[in-house]
Image (cartoon, rainbow, N blue to C red):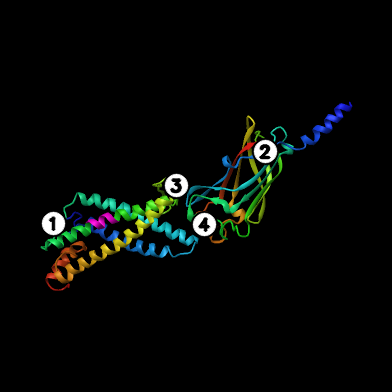
Amino acid sequence: MALRNTDARWGGIAQFFHWLIALAIIAQGAIGLTMVELGMTPTKVKVFALHKSIGLTLLALALLRLAWRSGQRVPRDPPMPRWQHFAARASHFLLYVLIFALPLSGWLFNSAANFPLEWFGLVHIPSLTHGLDPVLKAWALRAHVVLFWILVGVVAVHVAGALWHHFVQRDDVLLRMLPGFEKRRLARRQGVLQ
Amino acid sequence: MKGTVLLALLVLPLAAFAREWKVDPAHSALTFTGTYQDEKFEGRFKRFDAKIDYDPADLAHAKFDVTIDIASVDTANTERDRALPGKDFFDTAQFPRAHFVTTRFRKSANGEVLADGTLSLRGVTKPVTLVVKFSQTGNGATLDVDTDLKRLDFGIGGGDWADTSMIGNDVAVHGHLVLTP
């Protein structure tokens, strides 16, 4: 598989970022929703620390992904109405905004709450504020939660769109983000793969 | 001769008490530095009462007697400040106050003044030694005391919280008192 994007498909690097970030977001959402229900025990502290470490990883991945994408062509969309073009572009743009905004709002909340921050217990991460800031803390927490539910909504649209392209439109939009694209496209043409 | 005895009688009771000071609460602080998740954090006890009898020239009659309102702990983190008075940590419902009282003052080999005493904290009483720095400024004085405690010696954060890789065992305690006559 080529690492770079082509007109017809996403390259290996783009696919790696897409699926790794997708997995991390699912794990992050599940951990985030669970951890806030835990009682005040060392387990809770460790689960929060894991959530923070994954969040920082996501932020780093988002940066690398954007840097990589900026030097890449984007595969050409199949023919579709203008509003669908627009919807696809807008949702992709929003997803990029959110994969930055979510970890940043979490980092800001953690800083304003005056909690320590380290990446998997290895690297100390500095605070974004000068210690406790109750107003900013409340604001950042609300932003973090609201942004999460917006992300859930946009991801739902994104997944629905991909499945609609695959099963209804029967085009390459989903396949070109999957490894083994050429083989699958061939198989699909021959009617082996639905 | 008569006069000297009389003078001695007058002076002796005074000499038996080292100089008594008042603590200026607005400029005094009782703080501590702990470690949480590999990061240092500072806390303070906003309310404490210190009786200070101290004259650097008369250590034999010096005395510190300090009572600390443990529930007044403040570490600039709402969640931590909610947890600290709880049963797992200071358990202020059962042990609302800590008490430190000196038993004797001495000079170390390098000339530092050391105050030996006992600290009662969370139902545990242990000997504790303070390093004392005293400096007189005009009518008033400042008193700085330091000691290092181990939180687990006093059962603070025992059980599930005993893991010192999460919460460090060493806690440096610092008192800065501004004294007025």
Please report the residue visible at 36 percent of the width from the left and 65 percent of the height from the top. A30
Q: Residues within 10 Å of mark 4 (few under 14, many from 20)?
A: few
Secondary structure of the residue carrying tag 2 is strand
Please report the residue visible at 18 percent of the width from the left and 65 percent of the height from the top. A175
Tell me the CA gap for discs 1 and 4. 57 Å
- Res B21 label: 2
Give me the chain letter of mark 3.
A
Tell me the CA gap for discs 2 and 4. 34 Å
Please report the residue visible at 69 percent of the width from the left and 33 percent of the height from the top. B56
| Foreground of the two, B36 or A38 | A38
- Res A131 label: 3
Q: What amino acid type should be assigned to the residue bearing mark 2? A: Trp
Q: Which residue is denoted by mark 4 in the rendering?
A: B82
Do we see residue A122 in this rendering?
A: no
Pair 2/1: label in front: 2
Pair 1/4: label in front: 4
The image shows residue A41, relative to residue A61, as above or below, that is below
Do we see residue A157 in this rendering?
A: yes
Q: Quadrant of the N terminus of chain B?
A: top right
Q: Which residue is denoted by mark 1 in the rendering?
A: A7
Check if mark 4 and mark 3 are on a common chain: no
Secondary structure of the residue carrying tag 3 is loop
Q: What amino acid type should be assigned to the residue bearing mark 1? A: Asp
Q: Residues within 10 Å of mark 2 (few under 14, many from 20)?
A: some
Q: Residue furthest left?
A: A79
Give residue B14's position: percent from left, percent from top: 77, 35
Please report whichever mark, 3 or 1, sits nearer to the chain's N-terminal start.
Answer: 1
Tell me the CA gap for discs 2 and 1. 83 Å
